[in-house]
Amino acid sequence: MSQSSIQEAAEYVTKQYGSGQPIDIMVQDFAPQTIEDAYAVQSAFLKQLSSTQGSVGGYKIASTNPAMRERTGVSGPCAAGIFTKQIYHAPATFDHTDYEQFCIECEVGVRLASDLPASGAPYTRSSVGDAVEWLCTAFELIDRRQSASGSGAFAPDIKSISTISNAGAVLGIPVTNWQDLDLAASRGTMTINGECVSEGLGSNVMGHPLEALAWLANLKADQGEELKAGMLIMTGTLTNLVPLKAGDTATIAIDGLGEASLTLK
């Protein structure tokens, strides 16, 4: 994919994203054809958006949950940036008119205490654990947009990477003494207006949430980049993705990591 096509694709995504329109990148003449192309488009898009959103403060990892991959047709994990200004602390309140379709997921959030440089790859669950400052129960916020999938074996993966639906994160209270927790066996629950609507285990996230962190560190290393100390990493959902409507209050909880809540007004 040429640099001019990457730029054209990024400009298209930026325009559609800003206007709240469907992001049908996969049916455009400049649609990315490979996973590498899709990440290049995403990087250019984030650079354009940073003029109004500011710096990237971390990453979300998507499609770590087998049920979510089956639902979307994506073959494996993918990642996208999170802007610092879109990282909030619970309890938080959001206005439904600011979003096309406000959805939430229940995740383990990770803050890094030290860098994970490309030179340290390949990373494992154990080695990335040494770089963790704290964990928390966290909402991933998703502003879901309708878009066309296009065609080809990797079309869902490429679309997912290129059309970032992340709208931020809401963090619960940091837990620094997490090392003895059995995160794979920890149960996450999501409650809407007092009713439990979804639950799942940490093992839904690539077997263990820190496996997702290791995957991301290795992806960035392959791209010649690194994860920096102070970054927030959202490791992927334990539960289903759930849409909210105006007036809803949601609470999520993960064994050993506490809970977080938000309201959509």
Image (cartoon, rainbow, N blue to C red):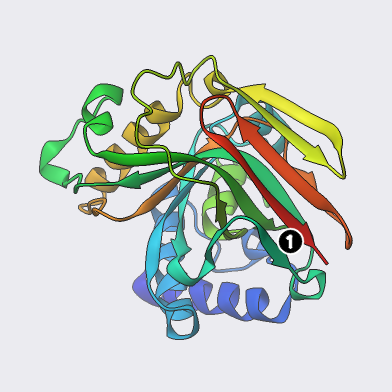
Residue 52 image position (x, y, % from top left): 49, 85
Rendered view: 173 above or below 181: below
Residue 188 image position (x, y, % from top left): 64, 28
Q: Quadrant of the N terminus?
A: bottom left
Q: Nearer the viewer, residue 217 or 10?
A: 217
Residue 27 image position (x, y, % from top left): 67, 62
- The amino acid on which the numbered mark 1 sits, given as a three-letter code, is Arg
Q: Residue furthest bottom?
A: 51
Left or right of 174? Residue 29 is: right
Observer able to see residue 26: yes
Q: Which residue is mark 1?
A: 145
Query: At numbered mark 1, what does the secondary structure look like: helix, strand or loop?
Result: loop
Q: Nearer the viewer, residue 239 or 216?
A: 239
Q: Nearer the viewer, residue 120 or 141?
A: 141
Rendered view: 155 above or below 75: below
Task: Please tell me how crowded label 1 is: few (under 14), some (14-19), or many (20+) other residues with Cα within 10 Å.
Answer: some
Q: How many marks?
A: 1
Question: What residue is shown at x 64% (from left), y 73% (from top)?
Answer: 17
Question: What residue is shown at x 63% (from left), y 67% (from top)?
Answer: 28
Observer able to see residue 63: no
Q: Residue furthest left?
A: 119
Q: Quadrant of the C terminus?
A: bottom right
Left or right of 76? Residue 119 is: left
Rendered view: 233 above or below 125: below
Question: What residue is shown at x 38% (from left), y 63% (from top)?
Answer: 57
Q: Quadrant of residue 134?
A: top left
Q: Nearer the viewer, residue 146 or 30?
A: 146
Question: What residue is shown at x 67% (from left), y 33% (from top)?
Answer: 68
Left or right of 65? Residue 183 is: left
Left or right of 156? Residue 109 is: left
Residue 209 image position (x, y, % from top left): 45, 29
Q: Quadrant of residue 146?
A: bottom right
